[in-house]
Image (cartoon, grey):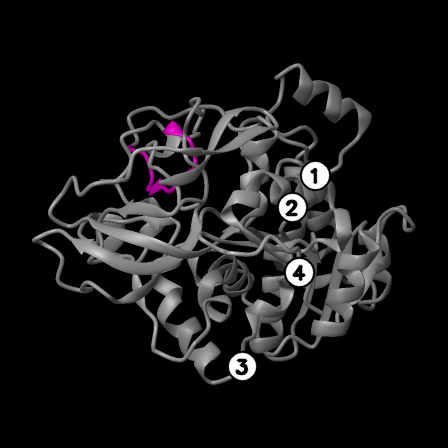
Amino acid sequence: MKALTYHSAKDVRVETVPDPVLQDEQDIILRITATAICGSDLHIYRGKIPGMKSGDILGHEFMGVVEDVGPGVTKVRRGDRVVVPFTIACGDCFFCTHTLFSACENTNPGRGAILNKKNVRSGAGMFGYSHLYGGYAGGQAEFVRVPKANVGPVVIPAGLADEKVLFLSDILPTGYQAVVNGRVGPGSSVAIFGAGPVGLMAAASARLLGAEKIFMVDHHAYRLAFAQQAYDIIPINFDEVDDPAELIIEQTDFRGVDASIDAVGFEAKGSALETVLTDLKLEGSSGKALRQAIAATRRGGVVSVPGVYAGFIHGFLFGDAFEKGLSFASGQTHTQRFMPELLEKILEGQLHPEIIITHRLSLEEAVRGYQIFEKKQEDCRKVVLTPGRSDSVLEASA
């Protein structure tokens, strides 16, 4: 089969690799009909994620048709069209029984990214996201093996286009969990840092849950313009505004917002010092977006962090967080928990995640897709790849 494989930073290739096979009684083999490039994939593409091996298959946002099933699979059958969550969960461990699926104790043979790990078991395995998270082959391919198929895949009703439901695999539940974690409800004020795919899904989710005022901070004018048109956000371009948090505070009666969402993560554009420290591996992440989120949030508010972080952070300002009485919520998404209710919202016409798609490419054009997305070329917001697509025309949706 054809698959996108990693070899080193900025070196990914579409290659012919062996087809996946069933390895466990709860496995299924999925024929991929749509897969997407995620912002988290760019961390790998830039060589920022350790534990990658040459030849690893990338991709954790995908869906398709069930081609084969193990003898222990009861929830799906051959021919079902399903969306698969990016986290792999057993459904039976302590955390899964508490619907904390991304903390599953039984699916990750890797060590995870915790530095001070002690004897804590690793969290859930993930598709296409390094051997820290199990070394599972990803879904930017023609076929993929899906473990624990009685827990993860969600069957999609007939009549729904792939694009409408594809993002149930990651970015829609991730944005939604960030908003839920932020305790956003009717009348809430929210600041979202980052207008990438997760930030956009957070804005859509905040509107769904009744937020009254949504600020969005980014420095790509085309992404802010789209978010303003689609979700009625208040755009703040940090290339033009020196201190976005200060502006947010001024526009919220000098209190700050009820919740801030850091949808940027460890590759936030930080200071020169932070750049040097991260290049020297003396810290793991830029703290710029997190500092802004802390500053922009009112006393007693919530800082919700769906953006990926690892290791040490310079200038965390925890004293400010303590003095303001802030709550923090973070971590990988408990995707399985939110997929069914979000599918219902799509069916009811309350969510339209597909509107963020700008580029549709064949799987064979995946390398170009990564380049466009990474460099923010052609006003790219989101790339969807289709295995077996007969044409190679780059399309853009409004």
**Distance from Cα at disc 2 to Cα at disc 4:** 27 Å
Q: Mark 2 vs mark 4: which is more N-terminal?
A: 2
Please give the residue where the numbered disc 3 appears in the rendered image: 350
**Distance from Cα at disc 3 to Cα at disc 1:** 31 Å
Q: Mark 3 vs mark 2: which is more N-terminal?
A: 2
Circle 3 crowding by C-alpha within 10 Å: few under 14, some 14–19, many from 20? some
**Distance from Cα at disc 3 to Cα at disc 2:** 26 Å
* Mark nearer the viewer, 3 or 1: 3
Q: Secondary structure at mark 4?
A: loop
Q: Are marks 1 and 4 in contact (CB under 8 Å)?
A: no
Q: Position of residue 376 (x, y in %)?
A: 74, 46
Amino acid beneath label 3: Gln
Q: Is residue 105 left or right of residue 223?
A: left
Please give the residue where the numbered disc 4 appears in the rendered image: 395
Please give the residue where the numbered disc 2 appears in the rendered image: 264
Q: Are marks 3 and 1 in contact (CB under 8 Å)?
A: no
Residue span colored magenta: 121-131
Amino acid beneath label 2: Val
* Mark nearer the viewer, 3 or 4: 4
Q: Position of residue 214 (x, y in %)?
A: 72, 68
**Distance from Cα at disc 1 to Cα at disc 4:** 29 Å
The image shows residue 370, relative to residue 394, as above or below, that is above
Residue 303 in sight: no
